[in-house]
């Protein structure tokens, strides 16, 4: 499974992207990620959850690719239900680990 | 008209406003009644709004702040940790949000007679400690929300401090609320960049007023102190020299343009609202430097009048140039120093005032394709 994460907007307006290949994850973290995706019902979410622009919030494009499905969801801080917010926060944290120049 | 007090009837309105603001309880009541009667006769939209502010101030007792703690979660507003008049909390972020929203309220009230975000005493609610490692702050349509930056990382890996640490960031977020209640600038392309710019303008003015700085003394940096020493940058944006605020191996280079010739066409970030705001930001800076003195007094008043009385949700940069020019003429005289300063400010970023006339539809189409009409 691969995840492509794009974050735009925010007070700074700086774009952040990163790609995650779950083959690189320890088994325990992979299991945790699978659970987060399941709780978010990620593959059943609509393509776009952002219904109104919220000044300075982050907007996210998250694409998850498995052997059988590719699904992209556009969301934001205010637009994410708590179940999806957990995935967003996980990916935000992962992107911070990879931001070395 | 019946006058509550013969003496107050001959006192000019600006003095009545001062009495309404600073007088004793009975003086204030009398001044307010006189102002209401006189403004009813004049029928001035703006004066009525200011009066509404004074009245709600009298009723609600001024600013009403509340700070909540999201406890590193996403649920808003979270747990209340400090209310209006409460002693300082043990949490520095909560105190910064409390004090910063107070200083912002004070700028709007004392400089422009505005009572809070809606000019009707709307409580100023802030949430701190939003999520974990959240390098951001935003206005969600009802309240301000602040992250802690990189405070969860080891010191040598941190890029961002907590977002409440910068007074101009707090003023910026609160101003999004003011804009929402006034011009309601659509958060996309040029109107969105104007929305951002007004937040930077008044965010910076809150800081300048709090520090007692003239336009010449101010640094005109937005988010000065937001970066840790690990970042090569003075702050997030420079109103004085857009595009020069930071240049860092990790964060990259400040992408803001300072002139229309460098306008960035993009669909990201709602059409580059945080990028192209550099253009109107610099127009304000140039105008403020031309006018001189404390920027919140005259230049800020001109921009405030444009935001509250003139601009509309679809206004673009050209409209903002024309309407701030118009506002300067109305406030300080046609062809006066202030109006010419506004003209110069926009000219320096490549926008000639007077370009809005009759070209609204054409301009909208041209803007969509990133083009502009040239004056002359």
Image: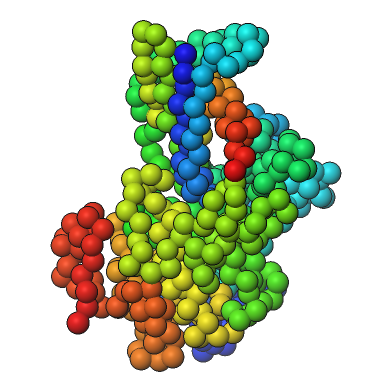
Q: Nearer the viewer, residue B241 or B333?
A: B241
Q: Nearer the viewer, residue B333 or B295?
A: B295
- Above or below residue B286? Residue A32 is above
Q: Nearer the viewer, residue B322 or B65?
A: B322
- Residue B36 shows in this picture: no
Q: Quadrant of residue B352?
A: bottom left
Q: Quadrant of residue B148?
A: top right
Residue name at image x 59 percent, y 25 percent: A90
Residue name at image x 73 percent, y 35 percent: B152
Residue name at image x 22 percent, y 74 percent: B374
Horizontal and vertical percent position of residue A5: 47, 29
State the quadrant of the N terminus of chain B: bottom left
Horizontal and vertical percent position of residue B190: 34, 58
The reply, left or right, for residue B26 in relation to residue B282 is right
Horizontal and vertical percent position of residue B354: 25, 78
State the quadrant of the C terminus of chain B: bottom left
Q: Quadrant of residue B373?
A: bottom left
How many numbered marks have been drawn onto this rendered protein structure?
Answer: 0
Q: How is the image coloured?
A: rainbow
Horizontal and vertical percent position of residue B165: 70, 53
Q: Residue furthest bottom?
A: B336
- Residue B297 shows in this picture: yes
Residue name at image x 23 percent, y 66 percent: B372
- Above or below residue A49? Residue B370 is below
Q: Nearer the viewer, residue B280 or B83?
A: B280
- Above or below residue B38? Residue B180 is above
């Amino acid at each position: 499974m691969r995840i492509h994460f794009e974050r735009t907007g925010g007070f700074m307006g700086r774009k952040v992207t990163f790609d995650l290949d779950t083959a690189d994850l320890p088994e325990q973290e992979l299991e945790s990620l699978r659970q987060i995706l399941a709780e978010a019902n990620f593959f059943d979410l609509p393509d776009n959850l952002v219904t109104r622009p919220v000044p300075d919030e982050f907007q996210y494009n998250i694409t998850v690719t498995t052997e059988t499905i590719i699904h992209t969801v556009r969301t934001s801080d205010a637009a994410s239900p708590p179940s999806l917010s957990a995935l967003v926060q996980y990916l935000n944290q992962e992107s911070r680990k990879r931001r070395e120049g | 008209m019946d006058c509550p007090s013969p003496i107050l009837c001959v006192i000019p309105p600006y003095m009545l406003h001062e009495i309404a603001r600073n007088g004793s309880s009975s003086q204030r009541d009398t001044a307010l009644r006189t102002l209401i009667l006189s403004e009813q006769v004049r029928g001035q939209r703006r004066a009525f709004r200011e009066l509404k502010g004074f009245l709600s101030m009298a009723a609600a007792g001024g600013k009403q702040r509340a700070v909540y703690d999201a406890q590193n979660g996403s649920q808003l507003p979270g747990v209340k940790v400090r209310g209006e008049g409460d002693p300082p909390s043990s949490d520095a972020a909560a105190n910064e949000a409390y004090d910063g929203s107070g200083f912002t309220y004070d700028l709007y009230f004392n400089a422009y007679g505005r009572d809070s975000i809606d000019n009707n005493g709307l409580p100023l609610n802030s949430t701190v400690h939003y999520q974990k490692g959240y390098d951001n702050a935003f206005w969600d349509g009802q309240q301000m929300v602040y992250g802690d930056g990189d405070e969860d990382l080891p010191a040598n890996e941190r890029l961002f401090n907590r977002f409440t640490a910068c007074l101009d960031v707090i003023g910026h977020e609160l101003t999004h609320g003011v804009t929402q209640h006034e011009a309601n600038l659509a958060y996309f392309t040029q109107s969105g960049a104007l929305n951002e710019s007004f937040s930077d303008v008044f965010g910076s003015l809150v800081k300048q007023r709090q520090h007692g700085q003239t336009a010449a003394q101010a640094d005109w940096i937005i988010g000065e102190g937001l970066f840790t020493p690990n970042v090569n940058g003075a702050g997030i944006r420079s109103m004085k020299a857009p595009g020069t605020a930071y240049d860092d191996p990790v964060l990259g280079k400040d992408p803001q343009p300072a002139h229309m010739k460098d306008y960035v066409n993009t669909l990201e970030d709602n059409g580059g609202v945080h990028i192209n705001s550099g253009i109107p930001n610099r127009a304000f800076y140039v105008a403020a430097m031309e006018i001189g003195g404390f920027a919140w007094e005259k230049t800020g008043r001109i921009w405030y009048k444009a935001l509250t009385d003139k601009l509309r949700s679809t206004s673009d940069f050209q409209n903002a140039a024309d309407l701030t020019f118009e506002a300067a003429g109305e406030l300080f005289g046609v062809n006066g120093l202030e109006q010419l300063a506004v003209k110069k400010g926009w000219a320096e970023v490549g926008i000639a005032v007077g370009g809005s006339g009759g070209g609204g539809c054409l301009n909208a189409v041209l803007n969509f394709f990133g083009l502009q009409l040239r004056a002359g």
